[in-house]
Image (cartoon, grey):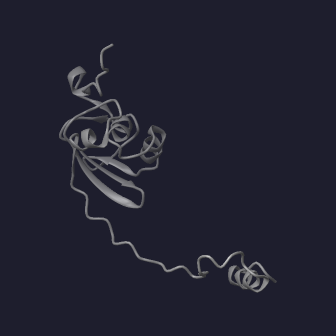
Amino acid sequence: MTARPAAKDASDSGDTMRVDVWMWAVRLVKTRSLATDACKGGHVSINGRSAKPASSLRVGDRVEAHIAERDRVLEVVKLIDKRVSAPLAAECLVDHSPPPPPREYVAPLFRRDAGTGRPTKRDRRRLDDFRGRRG
């Protein structure tokens, strides 16, 4: 039994491919339908022009996408048509994205000590008051 190749390089078979397939293959989005929705929603552009899901993508193109509350700016280095592992996907693009904004820490608003057991009736009433469920 022979090992199956990880992914066929799409640049061997032609010079273009769909942008939604490439976004999925390099793990920019989790599913291809999410990539298609991002393109349809106007969140993806290629070289400054708005991209449809079937827009052609070539090596050297600059893809700008707003994904997961973050702007991503990517340069296409290699075209692949199959989803590959993260280390291989990282070789197919150059990331020019700005750094993500710092996360804000939010402390829990209602805290109970571990090991105290079930909430008492008084604790439950306080929780309900806090959540606005009690009238």
Where residue 131 sits, quadrant-wise, is: bottom right
* Displayed quadrant of residue 57: top left
Residue at the far front: name it: 115
Asked if residue 127 is positioned above or below residue 68 in the image, the reply reads: below
88 to the left or right of 135: left
Q: Farthest right residue?
A: 135
Number of numbered discs: 0
Q: Which residue occupies the foreground of this view, 91 or 36?
A: 91
Between 62 and 85, the one nearer to me in the picture: 85
Looking at the rendered image, the quarter that the C terminus falls into is: bottom right
x and y, in percent, of residue 55 in the image: 34, 36
Residue 113 position, x and y percent, is 59, 81
- Residue in view at x 30 percent, y 15 percent: 2
Apparent side of residue 60 relative to residue 115 in the rendered image (left or right):
left
The residue depicted at 47 percent of the width and 78 percent of the height is: 106
Q: Quadrant of residue 133?
A: bottom right
Along the viewing direction, whichever of 62 and 24 lies nearer the viewer: 24
Residue depicted at x 25% and y 42%: 87
78 relative to 110 in the view: left or right: left
Q: Quadrant of the N terminus?
A: top left
> Horizontal and vertical percent for residue 41?
46, 49
Tell me: residue 75, above or below residue 16.
below
x, y percent for residue 120: 75, 81
